């Protein structure tokens, strides 16, 4: 599914968060929303979900305009992995049972648990975490499980908000490699990441994991701060 962002701008509380954002995320492509803390990375991803409204500009999916009316339809084709994890429930598997879009992980077939375990293996996660109380899991563990679930669902679009926050260097490399794998499978992946720049940027790269080590360390420290915008 191709996503087009055209002249996107957003204001919050009288402040211009970002403006002039134009980009195209092609089917099966990795697209990175990069910027410092407070530059609007999360807000842009939420606007793609139809949960935040642009001040100007527009968004399309396969040429169809994203509007308040069309947003619920497009959300059926999107997996969203937030940075700030705030789920209510005993375990993630309990949550999946209550979400229609996660029906393929309810265990209705013998293949579902195997698929989840395989995706978890690629991420360095453990499938057993899905049956542990949420209170016992760190946000990064929950984020890995959500990424694995997105891989199982094979949605048209994956939006991942600072997916490597609070993770080690090794785990960070594994996540970016996994996201690239999902893109190669045909998913349009849009992921945000901290960057030492002055404003929000949207770009493409085949090798996000080749950042200089000192830049990656800075990114990890900044991504560990829960970003609200």
Image: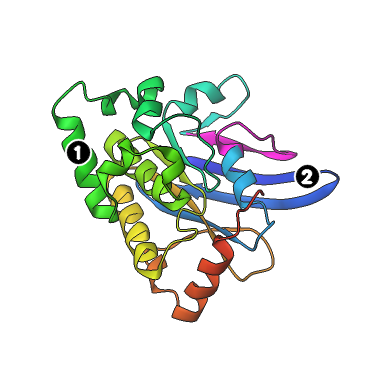
Instruction: Examine the rendered structure and indicate whether residue 78 appears above or below residue 76.
Output: below
Q: Is residue 55 left or right of residue 229?
A: right
Q: Is residue 8 visible?
A: yes
Q: Residue at x 69, y 52 (%)?
A: 20
Residue at numbered disc 1 = 115
Determine the residue positioned at 72% across, 51% down: 19
- Res 11 label: 2
Mark number displayed over residue 196: none
Say left or right for 40 vs 112. Answer: right
Snapshot quadrant of residue 77: top left
Does dot 1 land on a helix, a strand or a loop?
Answer: helix
Q: Position of residue 64 (x, y in %)?
A: 52, 28
Q: Given contact means CB atoms under 8 Å apart, are the residues at marks 1 and 2 in contact? A: no
Residue range of the region highlighted in magenta in the rendering: 47-61
Neighbour tally class for label 2: few under 14, some 14-19, many 20 plus, Cα within 10 Å: some
Of the two numbered discs 1 and 2 in the rendering, the one whose residue sits closer to the viewer: 1
């Amino acid at each position: 599914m191709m996503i087009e962002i055209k002249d996107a701008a957003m204001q919050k509380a009288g402040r211009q968060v970002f403006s002039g954002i134009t980009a195209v995320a092609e089917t099966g492509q990795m697209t990175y929303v990069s910027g410092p803390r407070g530059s609007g990375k999360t807000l842009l991803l939420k606007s793609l979900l139809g949960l935040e409204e642009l001040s100007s500009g527009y968004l399309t999916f396969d040429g169809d305009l994203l509007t308040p009316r069309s947003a619920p339809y497009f959300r059926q084709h999107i997996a969203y992995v937030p940075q700030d994890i705030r789920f209510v429930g005993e375990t993630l598997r309990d949550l999946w049972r209550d979400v229609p879009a996660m029906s393929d992980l309810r265990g209705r077939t013998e293949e579902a648990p195997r698929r989840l375990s395989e995706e978890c293996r690629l991420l360095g996660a453990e499938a057993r975490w899905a049956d542990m109380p949420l209170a016992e899991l760190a946000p990064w563990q929950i984020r890995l499980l959500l990424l694995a679930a997105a891989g199982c669902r094979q949605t048209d679009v994956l939006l991942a908000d600072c997916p490597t926050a609070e993770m080690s260097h090794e785990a960070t490399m594994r996540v970016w490699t996994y996201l690239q794998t999902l893109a190669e499978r045909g998913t349009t992946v849009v992921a945000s990441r901290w960057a030492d720049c002055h404003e929000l940027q949207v770009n493409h790269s085949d090798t996000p994991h080749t950042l200089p080590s000192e830049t990656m360390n800075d990114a990890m420290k900044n991504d560990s701060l829960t970003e609200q915008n």
